[in-house]
Image (tube, rainbow, N blue to C red):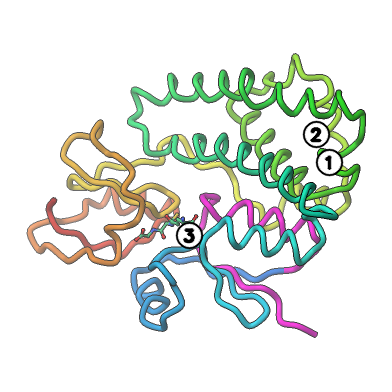
């Protein structure tokens, strides 16, 4: 029997969550290694597993894959969730990319300073209601079928359900004016593999906590392991984790007990060394 795919990422949704969804929906069991220490990350780097020095990393079929979109398309093709011909595939790509744009806005919310969070969430919900959900409501209305493409369960359906649930976490009434999307949500949630993934105790990750961005001696570390820095929290443009591998210890900086506890509670890497920026 082929080995289970293995996933390396931080403990949290971030860019890995759609990969978890796709594997789970395809009924594929997978293993995960959560990156909690700098040493784990450095080892992956040293072993040459991270093509561009970044995660998500997925080991599957004897390959070490990085780049989220590439991983997702490989899985969609492998598990027959990618349409029957090029025309269906390109439609799936369009639907997935639109949906991923919406989801990325949500993922990036953790980088917003607290005073901007509410406004940002309102903007995302408005975008979902005015730009994204009407498109999918119309698609379902126009073809009258159960699934988005080719009347067959595909990656597009999985990705859209994930996005709908994410937006509902921000505003539970977001589907009020989208009856077909509501029915779609119920239908896809009842696909047996997805139903199982939605049960407590599955490998699905919980939503990030509200206080996800910490001020830590001028450096900010989000719960998905990404980093940004600057003295003013409002200047924390997400540089992603680009700073992580290069960071060096600055002996003048100390981590307060309170921050250590918070970092532990949020399951973030504890051994984050840093230098002043
Ligand atoms: N285009 C990449 C971006 C991956 C990415 O930014 N990963 C972050 C964690 S979410 C990372 O590993 N950053 C480390 C770095 O940039 O040095 C993808 O979609 O997989």
Coordinates of residue 263 in the picture (x, y in percent): 36, 52
- The span shown in magenta is 1-29
Q: Can you tell me whether the CB of the residue at mark 2 lies under 8 Å from the nearest atom of ligand 1?
A: no
Magenta stretch: includes residue 6? yes
264 lies left or right of 94: left
The residue indicated by pointer 2 is 185
Q: Which mark is residue 10?
A: 3
Viewer-proximal residue among 24 and 218: 24
225 lies left or right of 273: right
Q: Circle 2 — which element? A: helix
Q: Are marks 1 and 2 in contact (CB under 8 Å)?
A: yes
Distance between the alpha carbons at the discs numbered 1 and 3: 27 Å
Q: Circle 3 — which element? A: loop
Q: Circle 1 — which element? A: helix
127 lies left or right of 240: right
**Quarter of the image containing the N terminus?**
bottom right
Mark 3 or 2: the one toward you: 2
Q: Can you tell me whether the CB of the residue at mark 3 lies under 8 Å from the nearest atom of ligand 1?
A: yes
The residue indicated by pointer 1 is 188
Residue shown at the point (42%, 77%) measured from the top left: 44
Magenta stretch: includes residue 224? no
Coordinates of residue 182 in the picture (x, y in percent): 81, 26
């Amino acid at each position: 029997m082929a080995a289970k795919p293995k996933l390396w990422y931080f403990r949290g949704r971030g860019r890995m969550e759609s990969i978890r969804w796709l594997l789970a929906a395809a009924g594929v069991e997978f293993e995960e290694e959560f990156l909690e220490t700098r040493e784990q990350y450095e080892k992956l780097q040293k072993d040459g597993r991270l093509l561009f020095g970044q995660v998500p990393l997925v080991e599957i079929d004897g390959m070490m894959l990085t780049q989220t979109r590439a991983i997702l398309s490989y899985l969609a093709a492998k598990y027959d969730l990618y349409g029957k011909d090029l025309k269906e595939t390109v439609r799936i790509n369009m639907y997935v990319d639109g949906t991923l744009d919406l989801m990325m806005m949500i993922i990036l919310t953790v980088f917003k300073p607290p005073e901007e969070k509410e406004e940002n969430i309102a903007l995302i919900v408005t975008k979902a209601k005015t730009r994204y959900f009407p498109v999918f409501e119309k698609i379902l209305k126009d073809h009258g079928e159960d699934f988005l493409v080719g009347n067959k369960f595909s990656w597009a359906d999985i990705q859209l359900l994930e996005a709908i649930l994410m937006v509902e976490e921000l505003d539970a009434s977001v589907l009020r004016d989208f009856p077909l999307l509501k029915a779609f949500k119920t239908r896809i949630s009842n696909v047996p593999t997805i139903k199982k993934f939605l049960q407590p105790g599955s490998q699905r990750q919980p939503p990030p906590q509200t206080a996800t961005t910490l001020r830590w001696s001028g450096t900010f570390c989000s719960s998905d392991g990404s980093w940004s820095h600057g003295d003013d929290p409002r200047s924390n443009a997400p540089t992603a984790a680009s700073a992580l591998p290069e960071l060096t210890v600055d002996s003048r900086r100390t981590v307060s007990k309170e921050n250590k506890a918070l970092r532990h509670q949020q399951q973030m890497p504890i051994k984050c060394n840093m230098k002043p920026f």
